[in-house]
Image (spheres, rainbow, N blue to C red):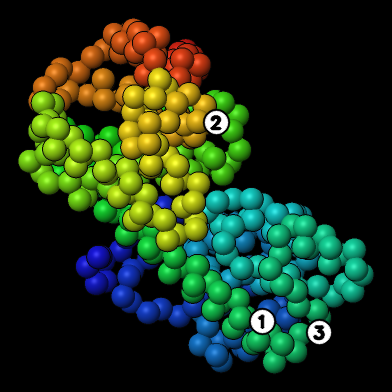
Amino acid sequence: MYPLGKAVRSPAGVVEVPGRRRAQRILLVDDNPDLIILTRELLSSRGYEVQSVASAEEAQQAIQKQHPDLILLDVILPGKSGYELCRELKDDPFTRLIPIVMITGLTDREDKIRGIEAGADDFLNKPIFPEELFARVHSLLKLKEFTDELENVEVVLFTLALGVEARDPYTEGHCDRLSRYASDLGRHLKLDDESVTSLKRGGVLHDLGKISIPDEILKKGTNLTPEEREIMQQHPIIGENICKPLKSLRRVLPIIRSHHEHWNGSGYPDGLRAHDIPLLARILQVVDVYDALRTERPYKPALGHDESRRTMEEEARAGLWDRELVREFFTMLDQHRRAA
């Protein structure tokens, strides 16, 4: 667990201080001074911390500086509309979980539909009635609390995963590199955003199950006894079981469980073959092998890029890796090198 009062950064990039209760932050986006004064007074009387801005552009700056727990957003703003801002915030992984209440004086059904399509969580009609304001704010902030609790659990898991990496000085930075390589390859393959995010998370969490592997086995590297190998090969299942209770990690579970499977069926823990191995697990596997070859270990020197490429292509022809993904991975690296 985290030391009480020590700031930590979540996978979404939000800095929080576990164990320290703070006033819930509400961002009011409206260019009507009278409505701003009234709403601020009402919410402040209930103990909320309220910040107000008059445009979508100012709102985006305020959100970056101080991550709000809820946004009250007027539909009609100077410049970019409330609909546009709402859609952008809901499309952004760093802000999509912030509840947004759209404030409107419009009663047309089509305007409500536009707000729903933009991702609004609720609506308030002008004039605002205090009881309705308090009810909607309280309900959505309670839901945000539950979301934050789940995110804090994710933070703990990510911290544990990095703790596993820290047990072996030869793997320093391994999780960060895999997270970057895997998500880059996902984008290169034009996968959807959720898959790319899962690859990014999988790069960190793939070896979480090694938390249960004794150091004398984990650091031995090679020449494991059959008994030691059997223990080591349980870590994908252990990692999957640790993460399974979180629905937010459901797309990461196949990566954790299957990243040691081989194209020819000789891998573990399930002996999957070819396309029976989930695509995201095969992607993580390719970048994992590359990083392992490029990293010095007690039992081997680090290989150069070209030698790693030849080795992986030979192993792919021998049936260990997905040949198509190996080719695409090195095509991507070549493109990055030329761009640099």
The percent coordinates of residue 295 (x first, y second) are: 22, 24
Examine the rendered structure and indicate whether residue 259 appears above or below residue 323. below
Examine the rendered structure and indicate whether residue 193 appears above or below residue 137. above
What SS does tag 3 mark? loop
Which residue is under mark 1?
A: 136
Q: Earlier in the sequence, mark 3 or mark 1?
A: 3
Which residue is under mark 2?
A: 187
What SS does tag 1 mark? helix
The percent coordinates of residue 125 (x first, y second) are: 80, 79
Q: In which quarter of the image is the C terminus?
A: top left
State the residue lying farthest toward the left: 216
- Say which of marks 3 and 2 sits in front: 2
Which residue is under mark 3?
A: 127
Q: Quadrant of the N terminus?
A: bottom left
The percent coordinates of residue 192 (x first, y second) are: 61, 38
Q: Earlier in the sequence, mark 3 or mark 2?
A: 3
Mark 1, other Cα within 10 Å: few <14 / some 14–19 / many ≥20: some
Please name the amino acid that badge 3 sits on.
Answer: Pro
Q: Nearer the viewer, residue 244 or 36?
A: 244
Q: In this view, does 33 lie to the left or right of 140?
A: right
The percent coordinates of residue 259 (x first, y second) are: 38, 34
